[in-house]
Image (spheres, grey):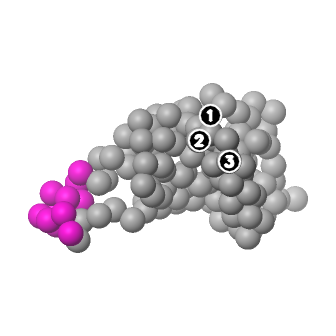
Amino acid sequence: MAGAQTSEVDGELKAFLGKFPTVIGYVVLNADGIPVKHHESMQYQKAVMYAALLSDFVNNCKRCLKELLNGPAESELANVRIRTKEGTEIICVTVADYTILVIQNCTGKPWVQDPDGDNAPEAAG
């Protein structure tokens, strides 16, 4: 992503974050699974970890779906959603040569950043 594309992508990401206030992080990956953009509150090392683990996972999901449905037409993967016990949801969407990984807070409670960079729901009390 270079030049005018970068500012256009930044504008779209800001608009996306404005529409969905429950988003607590995102990572944009290129076709090789390399993070090219990540949420400002997410540490780069964490973005790389999400990219490495989830790009393999999404590719395995695509391969599995093609084998299960036996055909390229109806076996195109649209997205993958993973919900955790802690109340976060990871949504992976591939479009053209890019994949966006979105981490969303589904708890309904405010989300606070831990000092070590991990996200956690605010303690009830």
Near-viewer residue (43 or 99): 99
Labels 2 and 3 touching (C-beta < 8 A): no
Which portion, as a residue range, is magenta?
A: 63-73
Q: Nearer the viewer, mark 3 or mark 1?
A: 3
**Where's residue 16, x and y in %?**
69, 64
> Which residue has dot 1 on it?
46
Q: Which of disc 1 and disc 2 is earlier in sequence?
A: 2
Q: Quadrant of residue 21?
A: bottom right
**Residue 2 image position (x, y, % from top left):** 62, 39
What amino acid type is highlighted by mark number 3? Ala
**Badge 2 vs badge 1, beta-carbon distance below 8 Å:** no
Check disc 1: other Cα within 10 Å, few if <14, some if 14-19, many if 20+: some
Q: Is residue 9 left or right of residue 92?
A: right
- Distance of mark 2 from mark 3, alpha carbons? 9 Å
What residue sits right under mark 2 in the picture? 1
Report the quarter where the N terminus lies.
top right
Residue 4 circle label? 3
User: Disc 2 versus disc 1: distance between alpha carbons?
Assistant: 21 Å
Q: Secondary structure at mark 3?
A: helix
- Residue farthest to the right, as pictured: 125
Q: Residue at x 37, y 40 (%)?
A: 56
Q: In the figure, is residue 121 to the left or right of 57?
A: right
Q: Amino acid at mark 1?
A: Lys
